[in-house]
Image (cartoon, helix red, strand yellow):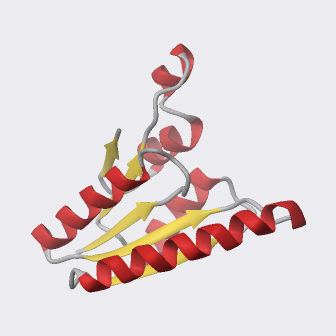
Amino acid sequence: MKILVAYVGGLDVDNAVLEVAKKHAKAFNAGLYIACSMERVSEKERMDLDKVEKQLAYVKETMDAEGIDCETHILVRGLTPGEDIVEFAADKKVDEIIIGIEKKSKVGKLLFGSNAQYIILQSACPVVSVK
């Protein structure tokens, strides 16, 4: 089994998402893909990219120490994060996607957020949302 974790970096829910992913990986003897999507990387966003690279390296070390097969990826393909995650999941033939959802405005709560909503509605595999 293969599980894709949509990692944002910097959200309060990120740690909860990783904990759920760890539990699922152990329960199903699954490998993890942990992917962060960025539409583009300008000079200003380069620092964000460096920060995410360091966070992903730490996450990989943590998963490796737990005996969980884990690959990390930063996706910069010009797609929205929702499109990127769904496409990556299809490319890797994953069996489950785990995403984080944070509380937003009343409208935001209804829609979950455009990227989360896109992933939930367009993914060919089950999506687990974590708050």
Q: Residue 78: tell me if it is visible.
A: yes
On screen, 69 above or below 121? Answer: below
93 vs 36, nearest the viewer: 36
11 vs 41, nearest the viewer: 11
Left or right of 27: which side holds 60? right
- The residue depicted at 43 percent of the width and 53 percent of the height is 14
- The residue depicted at 89 percent of the width and 67 percent of the height is 43
* Residue at the farthest top position: 106
Left or right of 114: which side holds 3? left
Percent x, y of residue 16? 32, 51
- The residue depicted at 56 percent of the width and 44 percent of the height is 115
Query: For residue 31, what is the image quadrant?
Result: bottom left
Percent x, y of residue 66? 22, 80
Quadrant location, the C terminus: top left
Left or right of 67: which side holds 74? right
* Count of numbered badges drawn on the protein: 0
